[in-house]
Image (cartoon, rainbow, N blue to C red):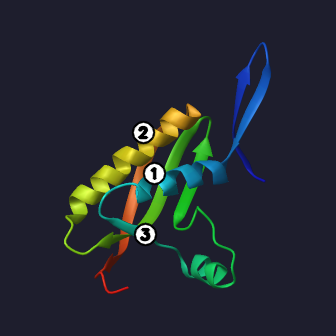
C-alpha cells in the first residue's frame, strides 16, 4: 500500500491516508453529481475490469505531497447535460468531500470528459 499522507496527533499517534483511499473518495463523490454517467478509465483500467478486478478508483489519479492533493479524473457524461456545469459540479464535490473526509487541502481537480452516454446502454 502506498501511503500518501501522514498526519500527526502529538498525544495519540499517527494517521496515514493511502492515495487509493483519496482516489476512492474522489470517484464516489464524482458519481454523486447529477449528469455523471460513470467514471471512465484508461485501457489498463478497462482490461482490469474485464478480468474482474474492478476498483473504485477507475479513471482517478491522485498525487499528494505535504498534505496537498492534486486529482486528475476521467468521466462519462449523460447525454443532454451541460458538460461545463457537470464538470464544475464534479470539481466542487470532489474537492469538498476530500477536504471534509481527510482534512487534506485540494489544490486541483482536473476533469476530462472521455465519453457521452446516449442512454441506450
Q: Name the side, left or right, on which 36 lies relative to 1.
A: left
Comes first in the chain, label 3 or label 1: 1
Rate crowding at label 2 as few (under 14), some (14 to 19) or many (20 or more) other CA atoms within 10 Å: some
Residue carrying label 1? 29
Contact between labelled residues 2 and 3, with CB atoms less than 8 Å apart: no
Q: Secondary structure at mark 1?
A: helix
Residue under the point 50% across and 55% down: 28
Whether residue 112 can be seen here: yes
Kindly identify which residue carries mark 3.
Answer: 38
Q: From mark 3 to mark 2, how far is it between C-alphas? A: 19 Å
Position of residue 47 relative to residue 13, above or below, is below
Contact check, label 2 and label 1, Cβ < 8 Å: yes
**Helix, strand, or loop for circle 3?**
strand
Q: Is residue 4 left or right of residue 62?
A: right
Mark 3 vs 2, N-terminal side:
3
Residue 117 location (% of width, % of height): 32, 79
Q: Which mark is residue 1?
A: none
* Depth check, front residue: 16 or 33: 33
Q: Disc 3 versus disc 1: distance between alpha carbons? A: 11 Å
| Viewer-closest of 49 and 23 | 49
Badge count: 3
Circles 3 and 1: CB atoms closer than 8 Å: no
Q: What residue sits right under mark 2 in the picture? A: 96
Picture residue at 44% right of the left edge, 67% below the top: 74
Foreground disc of the pair 2, 1 = 1
Amino acid at each position: 500500500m502506498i501511503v500518501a499522507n501522514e498526519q500527526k496527533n502529538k498525544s495519540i499517534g499517527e494517521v496515514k491516508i493511502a492515495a487509493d483511499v483519496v482516489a476512492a473518495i474522489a470517484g464516489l463523490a464524482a458519481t454523486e453529481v447529477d449528469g455523471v454517467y460513470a467514471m471512465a478509465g484508461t485501457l489498463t483500467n478497462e482490461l482490469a475490469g474485464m478480468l474482474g478486478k474492478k476498483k473504485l478508483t477507475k479513471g482517478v489519479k491522485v498525487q499528494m505531497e505535504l498534505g496537498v492533493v492534486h486529482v486528475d479524473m476521467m468521466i462519462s457524461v449523460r447525454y443532454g447535460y451541460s458538460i461545463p456545469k457537470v464538470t464544475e459540479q464534479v470539481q466542487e464535490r470532489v474537492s469538498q468531500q476530500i477536504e471534509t473526509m481527510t482534512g487534506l487541502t485540494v489544490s486541483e481537480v482536473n476533469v476530462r470528459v472521455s465519453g457521452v452516454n446516449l442512454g441506450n446502454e
